Image (tube, rainbow, N blue to C red):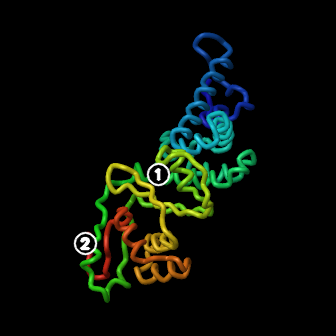
Amino acid sequence: MSVNQSGFARALADRALPVPHGLLAWNGPRPERRFDVYRNNVAWGLIEALRSRFPAASAIVGDEFFSAMAADYTQREPPRSPLLLAYGDTFADFVRDFQPAAGLPYLPDVIRLEAARSHAYHAADCRSLDAASLASIAPDRLPFLRLRPHPSMAVVRSPHPAVTIWAMNAGEVPLGPIDDWRSEDGLVVRPDMTVHVHRLGPGAAVLVDGLAAGLCFGEAVEAAIASDTAFDLTASLGQVLQSGAFADIDTGDTHAA
């Protein structure tokens, strides 16, 4: 008797379900024990896949808490692809509503930052735009040009110091108290073989998001100025170009890289 594949998959993800009808074990008539071992191995593998993708989040809450949180997530959100590279893309939203983690309101944003890093790692290779290419554009054309984002680029915005918290728990900077608890925006990009996370200055995230969404340079700058009176165009543009966040210029009648 054949086993229904969808029923088999549901039983793997839900321990409350019985062994699928028609399942047999090679070493006996009762396959419950062997199926439980297999189910445990699958659950452990998914938890470890999440821990591997979100190591800073695991460091923040500890292994035991993370395992329990991840186990709950895997029950509610089983993988829908045999490739686990993107498994956990909805983990941040789950953690946001996970009551035992309510005392860590910054944790979902740290997870979003780590998810962006893993996406950047697997993004297509692409040469980044250099400052000289932008400098070659006539000043009167600058407000109208558009920039194409690097395939690996992402912006993660947070009302918490999520970039600093991630850096401390990823081993990028020493652990320590955060005396100036304020919002932070992170720019994630892989211009070469290494994924980098940059903490953006005031209004810079609005500039980058606007350009990535297709706004012309002048429109994106206006939006950034309106978002934060502390926005510094020179500093922000320099940081963005140096990071490799954009790959190409479209002036409307030329295409330079």
Query: Of residues 42 and 68, which is closer to you in this image?
Result: 68
Q: Earlier in the sequence, mark 2 or mark 1?
A: 1
Query: Of residues 73 and 196, which is closer to you in this image?
Result: 196
- Disc 2 and disc 1 in contact, CB within 8 angstroms: no
Residue at 37% over, 62% down = 243
Q: Quadrant of residue 47?
A: top right
Q: Is residue 34 above or below residue 49?
A: above
Q: Which part of the image, by quadrant, shows the N terminus?
A: top right
Task: Give the secondary structure at mark 2.
Answer: helix
Residue at 54% over, 54% down = 164
Per the rendering, the mark at residue 117 is 1
Residue at 58% over, 45% down = 57
Q: Is residue 144 above or below residue 246?
A: below
- Amino acid type of the residue tagged 2 in the rendering: Ala
Cα–Cα span, label 2 and label 1: 27 Å
- Which one is closest to the eye, mark 2 or mark 1? 2
Per the rendering, the mark at residue 228 is none
- Amino acid type of the residue tagged 1 in the rendering: Arg
Q: Tell me residue 88's x, y (percent).
A: 57, 46
Left or right for 30, reference 225: right
Residue at 49% over, 76% down = 231
Q: How many marks?
A: 2
Q: Tell me residue 143's x, y (percent).
A: 38, 84
Counting other residues with Cα less than 10 Å from the Cα at mark 2, is it few (<14), some (14-19), or many (20 or more)?
few
Q: Quadrant of residue 38?
A: top right
Q: Tell me residue 221's x, y (percent).
A: 45, 80
For mark 2, what is the residue? 132
Q: Which part of the image, by quadrant, shows the C terminus?
A: bottom left
Task: Give the secondary structure at mark 1.
Answer: helix
Left or right for 63, reference 190: right
